């Protein structure tokens, strides 16, 4: 039989560059004379900027530490064992760099089995074991603690999650089995499935305790000291830890069914990870832990050797690494300070921008508009949203009062903007209107002030062409809803200078947005791709394909919403306007649907009846179509080919630096699923890139099945 050490040695040979996490054992006397205690600290020797992870050698280090405390426990030398992490970090799970290099299923299975074999030893010691979640804990970091007898968590923990499904894996070191048996299936499904698929939503320390994952919650300042006092009370019998009885009847099945419905709504069956995790949770109902661990091993091996994980890691690296170092951004030292912001317009988008600037920059923000009623409505919206944050406990009363005081309105641009460092317009999407606004603003702002436009499709260069100082105009395109979507397309016009651009990137960072540098080209990145995609689908409908057939065509991709639902979200009028802008620029590729024009003219907000996916009879009566009926597969192939062609042309035009920037834009601005790993790797895997452009966008193996 292969030993744990042999399994881990084989996996370690595949991953020689692992940053090894040490497991240091030290001993201390518990308070109250309870006895001698062994404390294992996980530490990779780096500060908190390099989180502690588990690769095969790291698992071996923990295994050796458990060897030591196991012998001490058997000899009666210790009364318990604790596990904690270095400052700010408990452990953040498996080392994904190692997972990426695995080529054989046996190596993948060894990682799963090796983790199980090491972690479950913590539950088999002759003394109780304690996990002290002192800092960030994710994936295997959470799971190693689940194998312990008891757990405490720090109030200061900022991030606690099982993100595996988000990346295309399952919690494979006990998460799918132990968590539902600890806190019940409904709460486990929330953590494993719902939080993970909601863009890897994190729990904070108090929530970890509230869910029942941790038995006790302590303040961060003296967290370990308090945890040790609590441990002493538990071991001495002064404190009994009570846990709720788990309902293993129909409630368990209902929780799993709810998880499947949630996964269906998110990925429509297109990504296997969530369903594999739910299968294991369902089987864990009988409490057979070893059978569950075996199922986790098999699922891990299958998913590691599949394409979804590679896709998830590719996407994860984009948003975690490339997003933090925007390609083409000027030297940040050129950026000017921004101490006051002006917003031209007081509609919904402008008001969202004002709220964001006030919250993130904490500087005065002034909205202007054409009449007092609109100004008051815009400022009122911001104040109402701040009140909502107060009610939710997101801000305190003092902070809420300060934020409200920062946001004001004015009809006088000269008075409002005379000392502004950054002014952004969010007015009607018409070139003449925007040029007039910029001319008025330029006349009253300081010489150093940046003029930004939130245009979604118009030329920033043309917008600035009539100004005395066009070099300080920059595109600053947000995505709606502003508070939710991370992407910010920063557009460099022909005369934009480096200082203005550097200031724009510095502001974007303060706003906590994912900034991507974009060339001044029609509709930039996201809207150009989505409009080409939507145009292909609407074109099929205009030719005679039933709406429901065209709308289902992209379902196998597991996109967050279907094309027609997306159209309703964007708004037919906006989509029609952007299509018109792109038709003027590229008439041979971008059509303008006459049927969509009729829908807009009729004042309809979508093609479906409100709240349904049934075609609105009034919309159907407006449609004039041909008699060419395409299948779902034909519509899908046509749409993907159109997207591949457009991305190829955009890269040749230099709209963005590389294909990775297109993927980053769609993931953060359009909700492109992580499990697809970005649009360009997907097109490569599907063979569309080769058919359309004669070559893949990426080298072999990028976000793909290992070769």
Image: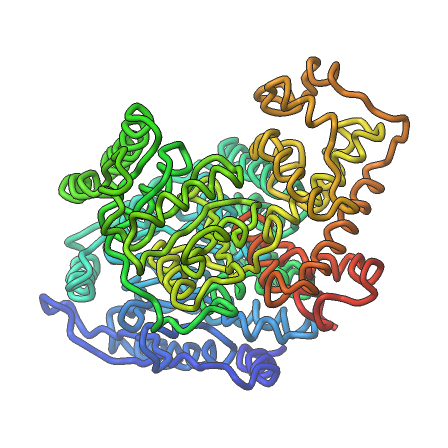
**Which residue corresponds to the image point at 52% horizontal and 78% vertical from the top-left?**
56
Query: Hey, which quadrant is residue 676 in on the image?
Result: bottom right
Q: Position of residue 341 (x, y in %)?
A: 29, 49
Q: Using residue 378 as the reference point, say whether residue 547 is left or right of it.
A: right
The answer to whether residue 294 is seen in the rendering is no
Residue nearest the viewer, comparing 85 with 480:
480
- Position of residue 519 relative to residue 103, above or below, is above
Picture mark count = 0
Q: Tell whether 64 sits left or right of 133.
A: right
- The x, y position of residue 691, in whole percent, is 85, 59
Q: Quadrant of the C terminus?
A: bottom right
Residue 319 in view in this figure? yes
- Place of residue 139 in the rendered image (x, y in percent of width and height, measured from the top left): 46, 61
Identify the image's colour scheme: rainbow, by chain, secondary structure or one colour: rainbow
The residue drawn where x is 34% and y is 67% is 335
Picture quadrant where residue 156 is located: bottom left
Lateral position of residue 633 relative to residue 475, left or right: right
Q: Dividing the image into 4 quarters, which one contains the N terminus?
A: bottom right
Q: Is residue 270 above or below residue 91?
A: above
Q: Quadrant of residue 580?
A: top right
Which residue does the image show at 38% across and 38% down from the upper left? 350
Using residue 560 as the reference point, say whether residue 510 is left or right of it: left
Of residues 626 and 28, which is closer to you in this image?
Answer: 626
Q: What is the residue that sits farthest to the left in this orientation? A: 32
Please name the residue shown 59% across and 37% down the image. 265
Name the foreground residue: 99 vs 29: 99
Q: Position of residue 31 (x, y in %)?
A: 11, 67
């Amino acid at each position: 039989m292969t030993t744990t050490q042999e399994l881990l040695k084989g996996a370690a040979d595949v991953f020689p560059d692992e940053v090894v996490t040490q497991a240091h054992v030290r001993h201390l006397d518990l308070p109250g004379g309870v006895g001698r205690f062994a404390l294992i600290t996980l530490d990779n020797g780096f500060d908190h900027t390099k989180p502690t992870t588990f690769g095969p050698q790291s698992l071996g280090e923990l295994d050796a530490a458990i060897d030591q405390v196991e012998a001490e426990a058997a000899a009666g030398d210790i009364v318990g064992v604790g596990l904690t992490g270095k400052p700010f970090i408990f452990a953040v799970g498996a080392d994904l760099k190692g997972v990426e290099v695995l080529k054989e299923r046996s190596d993948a299975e060894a990682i799963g089995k090796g983790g199980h074999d090491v972690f479950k030893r913590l539950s088999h010691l002759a003394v109780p074991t304690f996990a002290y979640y002192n800092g960030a804990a994710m994936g295997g970091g959470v799971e190693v603690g689940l194998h312990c007898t008891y757990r405490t968590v720090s109030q200061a923990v900022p991030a606690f999650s099982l993100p595996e499904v988000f990346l295309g894996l399952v919690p494979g070191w006990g998460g799918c089995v132990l968590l539902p048996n600890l806190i019940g299936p409904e709460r486990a499904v929330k953590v494993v499935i719902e939080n993970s698929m909601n863009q890897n939503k994190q729990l904070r320390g108090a929530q970890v305790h509230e869910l029942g994952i941790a038995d006790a919650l302590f303040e961060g300042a003296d967290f370990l000291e308090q945890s040790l006092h609590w441990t002493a009370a538990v071991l001495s019998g002064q404190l009994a830890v009570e846990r709720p009885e788990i309902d293993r009847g129909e409630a368990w099945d209902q929780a799993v069914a709810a998880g499947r419905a949630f996964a269906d709504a998110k990925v429509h069956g297109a990504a296997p990870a969530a369903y594999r995790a739910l299968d294991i949770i369902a089987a864990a109902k009988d409490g057979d832990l070893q059978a569950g661990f075996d199922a986790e091993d098999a699922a891990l091996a299958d998913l590691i050797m599949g394409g979804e994980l590679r896709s998830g890691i590719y996407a994860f690296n984009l948003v975690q690494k490339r997003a933090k170092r925007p390609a083409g951004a000027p030297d940040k030292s050129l950026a000017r300070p921004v101490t006051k912001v002006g917003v031209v317009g007081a509609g919904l988008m402008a008001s969202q921008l004002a709220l964001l600037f006030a919250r993130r920059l904490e500087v005065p923000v002034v909205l202007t508009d054409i009449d007092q009623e609109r100004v008051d409505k815009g400022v009122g919206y911001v104040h109402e949203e701040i009140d909502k944050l107060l009610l939710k406990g997101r801000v305190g009363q003092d902070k809420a009062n300060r934020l409200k005081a920062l946001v004001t309105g004015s009809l006088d641009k000269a008075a409002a903007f005379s000392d502004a460092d950054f002014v952004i317009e969010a007015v009607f999407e018409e070139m003449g209107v925007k040029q007039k606004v910029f001319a008025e603003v330029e006349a009253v702002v300081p010489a150093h002030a940046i003029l930004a436009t939130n245009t979604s499709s118009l030329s920033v260069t043309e917008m600035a062409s009539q100004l005395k100082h066009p070099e300080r105009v920059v595109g600053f395109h947000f995505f709606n809803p502003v508070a939710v979507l991370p992407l910010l397309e920063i557009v460099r016009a022909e005369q934009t200078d480096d200082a203005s651009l550097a200031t724009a990137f510095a502001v974007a960072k303060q706003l906590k947005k994912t900034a991507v540098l974009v060339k001044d080209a029609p509709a930039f990145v996201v809207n150009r791709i989505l409009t080409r995609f939507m145009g292909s689908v609407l074109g099929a409908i205009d030719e005679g394909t039933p709406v429901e057939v065209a709308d289902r065509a992209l379902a196998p991709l597991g996109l967050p919403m279907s094309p027609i639902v997306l159209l309703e979200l964007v708004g037919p009028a906006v989509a029609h306007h952007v299509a018109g802008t792109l038709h003027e620029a590229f008439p041979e590729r971008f059509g303008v649907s006459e049927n969509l024009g009729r829908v807009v003219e009729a004042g309809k907000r979508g093609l479906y009846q409100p709240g349904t996916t049934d075609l609105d009879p009034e919309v159907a009566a407006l449609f004039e179509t041909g008699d060419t009926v395409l299948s779902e597969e034909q519509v899908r192939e046509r749409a993907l080919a159109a997207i591949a062609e457009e991305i190829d042309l955009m890269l040749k035009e230099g709209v963005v630096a590389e294909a990775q920037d297109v993927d980053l834009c769609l993931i953060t601005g359009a909700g492109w699923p992580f499990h697809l790993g970005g649009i360009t790797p997907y097109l490569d895997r599907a063979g569309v890139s080769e058919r359309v452009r004669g070559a893949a966008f990426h080298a072999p193996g990028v976000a793909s099945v290992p070769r």
